Amino acid sequence: MLILGIETSCDETSAAVLDDKLEILSNVVLSQDEIHASYGGVVPELASRQHIVSIGYVVDEGLRRAKLTVQDLDAYAVTQGPGLIGSLLIGLSFAKGLAFYFDKPLVPVDHLEAHIHSAFLENRKIPFPCLALLVSGGHTSLFFLKEKFHYQLIGKTRDDAAGEALDKIAKYLDLGYPGGPLIDKMAEKGDPRTFSFSLPHMTDQSMDFSFSGLKTAALRTIKQNRITKSHPSFLDLLASFENAVIGALLYNVRRTIKIFKPSALILCGGVARNKKLRRDFARLAQKTGLPSFIPSPELCTDNAAMVAALAVEKINTGEELTLSLDLNAYPRT
Ligand code: KG4
Ligand code: ZN
């Protein structure tokens, strides 16, 4: 069986072809970073317009790299939500059109579930129960998986997502967009002990996250110390802020491990590309005696391979295949 995955939930247009053994035959990701860079963040209207321009080309390229034609495909998988509604609708409508024309099944996929499943794509034997930390530009959530496809939301951000906080600080300092990867690179040369930011704590003992207070504290520090790109403490500020964000993420992971006693840890989502987070997460897992699973960087940020992979797994577990033309996109979980 060959399946084409399509992902257009935010500002990446992506198409991938996988077989039923989860082998990735192609995974094309066309980023819109250049389009949104001058705005310092994703402009939803521009994102959906660009998906319309790119989607045909990206799907074509996905098939070309897999050395296949559209007639070779047996099923389609597409991100249904959550995400930007205009962007989602482009991918969904395109996939519906293909499925209708070729009379093949269409599997709708949840974006967050696909991110979590990017870990299973490279590691087939992740033990259950496991704990998944999903950190991206739109989400920061902790899920407990008692078994495959069984998700319990343990905590989520009450305001900004971790990636959003990194992007906003980078925007304020005029570093470029997306800010996460830039901070990742620059922070390596800074001293994270220079500025201390206190960890956000929930008064109700919940495992929820909050990054807007941390972001405001960083902005205050930047203003008070008049930090710009040429300031001697510029890199130290970035390292300290990155360290605080990672500290807040891992603080909740540590607490959740104690209560839920998982057998494995998963780190996924765009921010999981961050080198320090990957290192610190693996170190935390080691200290607690748990195996940790972190997808390759290219499978952390939005991509269609994770979408097709989740659909393959669902098909392999016997999920009924249909072509439902009344599928609709959903912006929120
Ligand atoms: O998963 P993703 O591609 O899209 C969403 O579903 O949101 O994540 C994008 C986020 C952005 O906030 C971006 O700045 C962040 O992931 N990101 C990183 C790195 N690479 C991407 N953050 C920190 N370090 C990185 N290396
Ligand atoms: Zn994502």
Image (spheres, grey):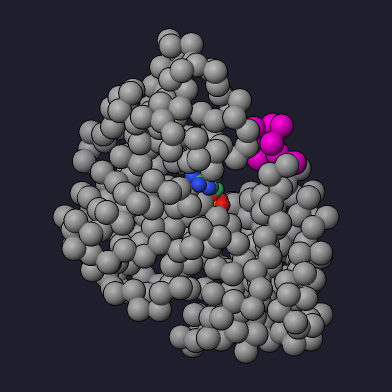
Q: Where does the magenta region start and end?
A: 35-43
**Looking at the figure, which quarter contains the N terminus?**
bottom right
Look at the image and say whether residue 36 sits in the magenta stretch: yes
Looking at the picture, how far across and down is residue 171, in whole percent? 58, 28
Q: Nearer the viewer, residue 153 or 311?
A: 311
Looking at the picture, how far across and down is residue 71, in whole percent? 79, 86
Q: How many marks?
A: 0
Horizontal relation, residue 193 to residue 270: left or right: left
Residue for point 59% across, 29% down = 175
Residue for point 44% across, 58% down = 268
Looking at the picture, how far across and down is residue 281, in whole percent? 32, 53
**Quadrant hosting residue 55:** bottom right
Q: Is residue 193 above or below residue 321?
A: above
Q: Nearer the viewer, residue 275 or 87?
A: 275
Q: Is residue 323 above or below residue 219?
A: below
**Quadrant hosting residue 62:** bottom right
Q: Is residue 302 visible?
A: yes
Q: Is residue 190 above or below residue 117?
A: above
Magenta span: predominant SS is: loop
Q: Nearer the viewer, residue 93 or 289?
A: 289
Residue for point 64% across, 51% down = 10
